[in-house]
């Protein structure tokens, strides 16, 4: 690939991901589409991530490593990788995940054939250290064929604790030229939901996104995964990000506006739920009741811990389980 522009720049933000980094790198470097570069931005890891990268790269000129001057979060790391990327396409890839050998070739072919500026594929979800079977994230006939994902589709899938899977979890392949022409980058104040926010703003500008139905991205669930940890600060950050894009969404068709209103209500309910739980854990029952009364939509969420316990019990005794929210 010396002297040639790569077809794909794979960008990876890494922070203390040494445990899974070697496997992640190998799944990229072993792609059937070999015209690629792998840009890893290390966010000041305190483990041996840099040693793992050096060992796995083993002189492979396709690997580029950048080290942040300070820990600034995955969004800042990805923005730096985007600026360094030279490929015609830019693929977002997490340092603890895997991809099928033909993933990049398939997504590039889909993007070029359908003239899409963003391409996403289904996820195959697996749990680290578990013998449980891998399972596709998107199920049903709605995701069985290639399709365009509209702005209303995208926002409508992004309600907190909804049963339908959130399309914001899908890992995008961007047309580099379209991304740069749009002038959109990751919000660096977001620690969770940064992919969703970036794609949302691109779709609002009219960029087209196509779904490849095959599950070629391997999404690893494990205890240290940042995507599984939600706190009040994260919800408040997402509400602030949504507020910033609200004026642009207000000019969109009714279906988009309705989807955005429903998402905002779900975030507000999740925030209220967090406040209720905080007060109840502190033994402040009156305070919890007051917080719940201020946002009644939080009360149904209180059933989630009960459902989770019942699901664990059912798994042990092989009873049918109750419905539960989509995995984060």
Image (cartoon, rainbow, N blue to C red):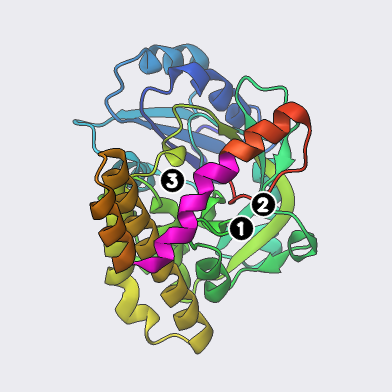
Considering the numbered disc 3 on the image, is that residue within a helix, a strand or a loop?
Answer: loop
Label placed on residue 323: 2
The foreground one among 256 and 4 is 256
22 in relation to 79, above or below: above
Residue 258 image offset from top left, x and y in percent: 48, 81
Residue 86 image offset from top left, x and y in percent: 43, 45
From the image, state whether disc 1 or disc 3 is nearer to you: 1
Residue 274 image offset from top left, x and y in percent: 33, 50
Q: Main secondary structure of the magenta part?
A: helix
For marks 2 and 1, the one nearer the N-term is 1
Q: Which residue is mark 1?
A: 163
The foreground one among 41 and 300 is 300
Magenta extent = 295-308
200 in relation to 120, above or below: below
Considering the numbered disc 1 on the image, is that residue within a helix, a strand or a loop?
Answer: loop
Considering the numbered disc 2 on the image, is that residue within a helix, a strand or a loop?
Answer: loop
Q: Determine the residue positioned at 54% across, 75% down.
A: 152
242 in relation to 16, above or below: below
Between marks 2 and 3, how big is the CA–CA gap?
45 Å
Q: Mark 3, residues whose alpha carbon is within 10 Å: few (<14), some, or many (≥20)? A: some
Label placed on residue 200: none
Residue 103 image offset from top left, x and y in percent: 68, 42
For marks 2 and 3, the one nearer the N-term is 3
Say whether marks 2 and 1 touch (CB < 8 Å): yes
Residue 160 visible to an observer of this rendering: no
Label placed on residue 86: 3
Q: Is residue 55 left or right of residue 121?
A: left
Q: Mark 2, residues whose alpha carbon is within 10 Å: few (<14), some, or many (≥20)? A: few
Say whether marks 1 and 3 touch (CB < 8 Å): no
**Residue 56 lies in magenta, yes or no?**
no
């Amino acid at each position: 690939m010396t002297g040639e522009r790569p077809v794909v720049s794979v960008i990876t933000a890494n922070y203390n991901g040494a445990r899974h980094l070697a496997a992640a790198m190998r799944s990229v470097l072993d792609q059937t589409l070999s015209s690629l570069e792998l840009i890893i931005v290390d966010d000041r890891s305190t483990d041996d991530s840099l040693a793992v990268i050096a060992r796995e790269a083993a002189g492979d000129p396709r690997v580029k490593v950048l080290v942040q001057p300070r820990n600034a979060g995955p969004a800042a790391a990805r923005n730096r990788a985007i600026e360094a990327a030279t490929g015609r396409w830019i693929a977002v890839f997490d340092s603890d995940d895997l991809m099928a050998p033909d993933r990049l070739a398939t997504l590039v072919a889909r993007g070029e054939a359908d003239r899409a500026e963003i391409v996403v594929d289904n996820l195959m979800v697996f749990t680290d250290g578990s013998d449980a079977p891998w399972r596709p994230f998107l199920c049903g006939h709605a995701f069985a064929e290639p399709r365009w994902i509209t702005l209303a589709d995208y926002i409508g899938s992004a309600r907190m604790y909804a049963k339908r899977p959130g399309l914001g979890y899908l890992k995008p392949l961007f047309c580099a030229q379209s991304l740069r022409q749009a002038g959109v980058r990751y919000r660096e104040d977001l620690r969770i939901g940064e992919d969703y926010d970036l794609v949302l703003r691109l779709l609002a500008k009219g960029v087209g996104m196509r779904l490849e139905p095959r599950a070629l991205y391997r999404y690893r669930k494990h205890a240290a995964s940042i995507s599984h940890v939600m706190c009040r600060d994260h919800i408040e950050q997402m509400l602030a990000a949504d507020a910033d894009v609200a004026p642009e969404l207000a000019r969109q068709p009714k279906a988009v506006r309705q989807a955005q209103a429903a998402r905002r209500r779900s975030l507000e309910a999740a925030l209220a739920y967090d406040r209720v739980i905080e007060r109840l854990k502190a033994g402040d029952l009156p305070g919890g009741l007051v917080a719940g009364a201020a946002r009644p939509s939080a009360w149904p969420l209180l059933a989630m811990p009960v459902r989770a316990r019942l699901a664990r019990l059912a798994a042990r005794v092989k009873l049918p389980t109750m419905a539960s929210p989509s995995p984060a």
